[in-house]
Image: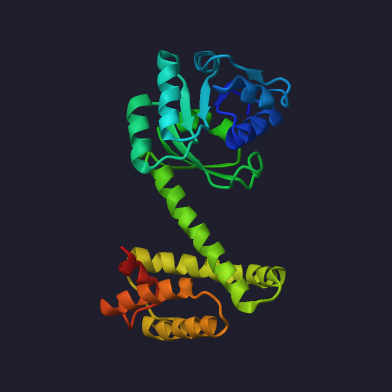
Amino acid sequence: MTEPPTVSVLGTGALGAALAQALHAAQVPTILWNRSPDRLAAVADRLPGVRPAATVTDAVESAAVVVLAVADAAAAEAVLSAAGDALTGRVVVNLTSTTPEQAQLLASRFGPEYLDGAAMSGTRLIGDPTALFLYAGAAAAFSRVEDVLKVLGRARFLSEDPRDASRWDTALLGLNLGLLTAFYQAVALLGGSATQLADVATAYLPFATGLIADHARQIDAQDYPADDGTLTVYAGAVDHLIATAEQHGVGADLPLAVRTVIGRAIAQGRGDQGLAALTEALR
């Protein structure tokens, strides 16, 4: 990246501070703003060379890229509204958590150089190449600032629909929580070392990710071969899991939920189809 653009980070909470730290470490000219002078100083004082801005207008006017990391969509709208005409010609990257509808509203008010984004790897990995950020909205704006966004982590552009970053954020949150909660269930069931289970589970992951890829193709084709067993067979397997958990005094909430979805799919006449057919029962 040659001659990086000046970036203003609006918000100095955990996310904003991590963004500023990553930009500063990469020698990107960085401006910081927070409505609380004390909170602003607490972060700016740790990052020599980063310029604190007294007002949001000053922060925006002095930058080519404006990154929002504030409390919520209402705060994002208030901050951008306060910036007013100073936003003209600036790419706005909103990393504040929003619903798809809120992202659409913000894009309609503050486009056409508005990007909605999601930090998918928390704050600790920001600045590391393994961190993942999702973006949606103005494609031309993304192309203009892609290099500086890569300073923060992997920058994945989804589509020109500004709602998509929030949609994907929500979907991947569900995926992550499902995976982790299933791990906690397994720890409770085994009753032994969580570290040992983590080692074995990690070795198992390549098989699981292979299944995700295979099942994705089946879902896209709406064709669900029972190569690894029918839903009727899986119903029996989950019944066994529920019984084992209950016999050991372990909560069976998760397998009971899975069993409910399997039962729904079987009631739809999908008992002889493969596991990926559960997608149809969840639509």
Name the residue at 71% across, 72% down. Answer: 193
Question: Hey, which quadrant is residue 239 in on the image?
Answer: bottom left
Question: Hey, which quadrant is residue 236 in on the image?
Answer: bottom left
Q: Quadrant of the N terminus?
A: top right
Is residue 140 at all visible to an observer of this figure? no
- Residue 235 left/right relative to 268: right
Decide: is 87 above or below 187.
Answer: above
184 vs 2, nearest the viewer? 184
Q: Quadrant of the C terminus?
A: bottom left
Name the residue at 45% across, 35% down. Answer: 72
Point out residue 15 in the picture as x, y percentages from the top left corner.
58, 37
Most extreme residue toward the left, as rendered?
268
- Residue 3 left/right relative to 161: right
- Residue 162 left/right relative to 14: left
Point out residue 25 in the picture as x, y percentages from the top left corner.
71, 31
Name the residue at 63% across, 78% down. Answer: 190
Decide: is 78 above or below 182.
Answer: above
Is residue 272 at all visible to an observer of this figure? yes
Decide: is 146 above or below 168.
Answer: above
Point out residue 209 in the picture as x, y percentages from the top left corner.
54, 66
118 vs 206, nearest the viewer? 118
- Residue 124 left/right relative to 252: right
Point out residue 28 in the picture as x, y percentages from the top left corner.
65, 25
Q: How many marks?
A: 0
83 vs 142, nearest the viewer? 83
Name the residue at 39% across, 71% down. Answer: 276
